[in-house]
Amino acid sequence: MTLEHHPLIKEFPEYHDLIHKLKTEDSQFRKQFEEYHELDKEIYRHEQDIEPTSDEYLDELKMKRVHLKDTLFSALKAASDS
């Protein structure tokens, strides 16, 4: 199984321009975007055994990433609807 990063732009390519706009204009979005990006990098390092960890901790990180992704998607959807 190939493990890879899950950057937000890859997850939501249809929002590429809006992601960039919100990163530059919305401090809350930018903070959550950066947190998502850092979390994704951490998960990747654990999955690649660069930084081994327990399965439970990795699952916790993945759940946090899903929650952040949902939050960011909601912000993107709201911004695109307005």
Image (cartoon, rainbow, N blue to C red):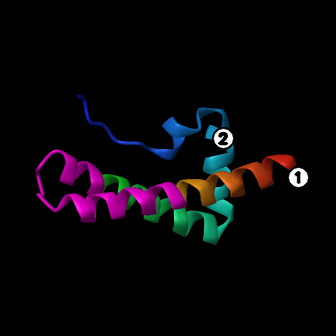
Label 2, secondary structure: give it.
Answer: helix
Q: 59 left or right of 22? A: left
Residue pictured at 78% horizontal, 53% vertical: 79
- Residue 25 percent coordinates (x, y): 68, 63
Residue at far front of view: 56
Q: Is residue 21 above or below residue 3?
A: below
Q: Looking at the image, which is closer to me, 29 or 68?
A: 68
Tell me which corner region of the image, top left, top right, bottom left or bottom right, holds residue 62: bottom left
> Majority secondary structure of the magenta segment?
helix
Q: Which residues are magenta?
A: 42-67
Q: Is residue 20 left or right of residue 10?
A: right
Residue in front for this viewpoint, 55 or 64: 55
The residue at 36%/53% (across/down) is 40
| Residue that badge 2 annotates | 17
At 53% from the left and 69% from the top, the residue drawn is 31
Residue found farthest to the right: 82
Please tell me the numbered disc located at residue 82: 1
Q: CA distance from mark 2 to mark 1?
A: 15 Å
Q: Residues within 10 Å of mark 2 (few under 14, many from 20)?
A: few
Q: Residue at x 70, y 55 (%)?
A: 74
Image side of residue 49 versus residue 73, left or right = left
Q: Amino acid at mark 2?
A: Asp
SS under mark 1? loop
Q: Amino acid at mark 1?
A: Ser
What is the number of the mark on residue 7? none
* Neighbourhood count class around disc 1 (C-alpha, 10 Å): few under 14, some 14–19, many 20 upward: few
- Image quadrant where one finds the N terminus: top left
Q: Nearer the viewer, mark 2 or mark 1?
A: 1
Closest to the observer, 71 or 24: 71
